[in-house]
């Protein structure tokens, strides 16, 4: 879900907890941010969110029918005739397929700043996404904090785009290993069970 | 790039095995669980029978749905998409683990093979459509 923010965005960003992704003018940043960018590449396999497909060719509601991961061919099959040609020639869509395979694991503890909306759409399933200038699902008016926000510090980082095979592995193990890899979640679950028994 | 033929053949083999062993193994599981539910209900507690019936029903539903999926997909494996392959591979894995725990070994082996074949197929599809 993308939250469209307005008001004192700097206060909101400095007070928010990591991880988060932000897209907007860089003068609104406050505190430590990772400036994430991705290398060149196009692909026809991945899991672009409906919002990314909507952004590229205006066919988000057709992409909602597909479960991740999917191929460009599958998307073409569900599109109506008039959009199919547009999708076939769209470089933006191929870029969205490529970026959707971004590896979120190294980005778990960071506040991320992106200047590419496609990268924001790719990160959206894994962390809260805030945007200025993109219409979101929810609109939030940020209130100003009591203290002035700290000056921005940007560190460059290159996004890791996994290969299609690694992406299948990632999707396969994500649901099985998630509770096991998160001991806090497991302990909390056991604690709750102890109270019930 | 085309999908490797050996992976498709392995998938077909695993699906055929799943259908054959699934029908037999799950029928056996159905009979056994009916007997156990009867015993639990009349000899011990009706609640125990109901709980066991619910658990075995869930297992048999998972088992028969993988068998049905394999039966439908065996003729046209090219219609299996990466997302469905990943989903059914997970379901087959669950069925394999539960079957192994309930000593339904033949069906456990065939489900585990199906899970592996679907996983390899999903990876192969990803590689070929990159």
Image (cartoon, coloured by chain):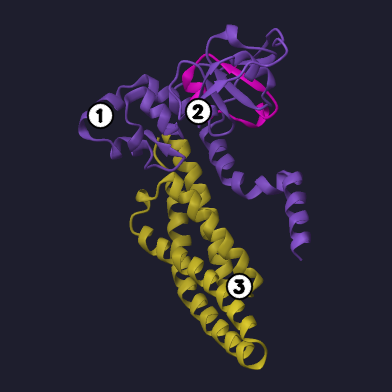
Residue contact at pointers 1 and 3, CB within 8 angstroms: no
Q: Which residue is mark 3?
A: B105
Q: Classify 10 Å Cα crowding around label 3: few (below 14), some (14-19), many (20 and above).
A: some
Packing grade of label 2 (10 A; few <14, some 14-19, many >=20) is many
Residue A67 found in image quarter: top left
The secondary element bearing badge 2 is classed as strand
Query: Is label 1 in a helix, a strand or a loop?
Result: helix
Q: Is residue B120 something one can see in this rendering? A: yes
Which of the 4 image quadrants contains residue A60? Answer: top left
Q: Residue at x 40, y 25 (%)?
A: A94
Whether callout 2 and callout 1 share a subunit is answered yes
Picture quarter containing residue A193? Answer: bottom right
Point 37% across, 33% down: residue: A72
Q: How much space separates mark 3 and mark 2, taking CA atoms?
A: 48 Å
Mark 3 — on which chain does it sit? B
A76 in magenta: no
- The residue that disc 1 covers is A83
How far apart are the two marked residues, 1 and 3, measured between alpha carbons? Answer: 50 Å
- Residue A192's x, y, as percent? 74, 56
Bounds of the magenta segment: A99-122
B46 is higher (above) or lower (below) than B119:
below
**Disc 2: which residue:** A2
Q: Which chain can be seen in purple?
A: A
């Amino acid at each position: 879900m993308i939250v469209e923010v307005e008001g004192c965005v700097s206060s909101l960003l400095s007070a928010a907890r990591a991880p988060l992704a932000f897209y907007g003018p860089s003068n609104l940043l406050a505190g430590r941010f990772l400036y994430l960018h991705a290398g060149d590449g196009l692909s026809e396999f991945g899991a672009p969110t409906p919002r990314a497909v909507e952004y590229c060719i205006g066919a988000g509601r057709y992409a909602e029918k597909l479960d991740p991961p999917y191929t460009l061919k599958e998307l073409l099959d569900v599109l109506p005739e008039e959009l199919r040609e547009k999708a076939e020639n769209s470089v933006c869509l191929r870029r969205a397929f490529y970026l959707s395979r971004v590896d979120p694991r190294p980005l778990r503890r960071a506040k991320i700043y992106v200047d590419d909306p496609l990268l924001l759409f790719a990160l959206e399933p894994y962390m809260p996404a805030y945007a200025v200038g993109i219409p979101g699902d929810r609109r939030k008016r940020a209130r100003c904090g009591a203290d002035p926000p700290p000056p921005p510090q940007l560190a460059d980082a290159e996004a890791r785009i996994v290969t299609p095979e690694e992406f299948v592995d990632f999707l396969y193990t994500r649901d099985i290993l998630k509770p096991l890899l998160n001991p806090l979640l497991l302990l909390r679950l056991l604690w709750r069970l102890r109270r019930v028994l | 790039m085309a999908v490797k033929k050996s992976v498709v053949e392995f998938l077909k083999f695993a699906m055929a095995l799943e259908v054959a062993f699934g029908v037999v193994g799950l029928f056996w599981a159905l009979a056994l669980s009916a007997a156990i539910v009867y015993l639990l209900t009349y000899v011990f507690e009706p609640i125990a029978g109901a709980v066991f019936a619910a658990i075995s029903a869930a297992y048999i539903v998972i088992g028969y749905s993988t068998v049905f999926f394999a039966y439908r997909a065996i003729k046209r494996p090219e219609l299996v998409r990466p997302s469905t392959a990943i989903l059914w591979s997970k379901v087959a894995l669950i069925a394999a683990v539960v079957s192994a725990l309930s000593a339904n070994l033949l069906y456990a082996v065939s489900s585990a093979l199906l899970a592996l074949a679907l996983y390899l197929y999903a990876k192969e599809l990803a590689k070929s459509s990159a």
